[in-house]
Image (tube, rainbow, N blue to C red):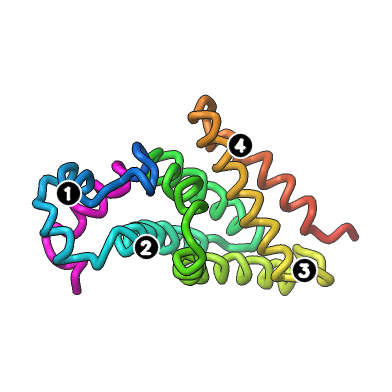
Amino acid sequence: MRNNKPKYNQIIEAAVRVIAENGYHGSQISKIAKAAGVADGTIYLYFKNKEDVLVSVFEEKMGQFIEKIAESTSQKQNAEEKLQTLIEEHFGQLSADYYLAIVTQLELRQSNYSLRLQINNVLKPYLTVIDNIVKEGIEQNHFRSDLNTPLVRQMIFGTLDEIVTNWVMKEQKYDLLSQVPEVHTLLIGALSRTD
């Protein structure tokens, strides 16, 4: 596996930084190699091309991101707590890595169709975590039984995604994590049973 090779993670970390600072289109392989402290040719031992670098960055970083969210939410007792943990982890991980936030929120949006399809495949396990929280909330009678799970998933993911994008666009001028309680309250208000 290429990610077990010593320079792979070095290149991934450098790529996140270079893409965040220069944009995807302005990030030549030579810039990534220089930032990683490797020769240009070394990049091609691990990646087919620049698009492969971007997809790999997303697979690696989002893989870790999703794994942490899945692990943290699984330790909570009910759907409301799980949703709060999901929001905390989503905001916390991206606010802790501003370069990654720029890449996920801005640069990946400008990619071509085939690249977006690959990115969507990487996101599927995260969307499954959201689906499971919604289903569990319905089963526990915490959430309304008439909820359309795919629509609720889009609402939750879209809300978190837009809040992080806004934070990135405003150059992190405020504490993203301070928004967790209000976002949680708003989402729970939309999902909760009223009786």
Q: Which residue is mark 2?
A: 55
Distance of label 2 from label 4 (alpha carbons): 30 Å
- Identified at 48% across, 61% down, the residue is 112
- Amino acid beneath label 3: Asn
Q: Which residue is mark 4?
A: 179
Tell me: 164 left or right of 10: right
Residue 114, image x, y percentages: 47, 69
Distance of label 2 from label 1 (alpha carbons): 17 Å
Q: Mark 4, mark 3: which one is toward the viewer?
A: 4
Distance of label 4 from label 3 (alpha carbons): 26 Å
Inspect the magenta stretch and tell me whether residue 7 lies in it: yes
Q: Main secondary structure of the magenta part?
A: helix
Q: Which residue is mark 1?
A: 33
Q: Which residue is mark 3?
A: 141
Q: In the rendered image, is residue 49 in sight?
A: yes
Tell me: 91 left or right of 150: left
- Identified at 55% across, 55% down, the residue is 86
Q: Mark 2, mark 3: which one is toward the viewer?
A: 2
Residue 11, image x, y percentages: 20, 53
N-term mark: 1 or 3 = 1
Distance of label 1 from label 4 (alpha carbons): 37 Å
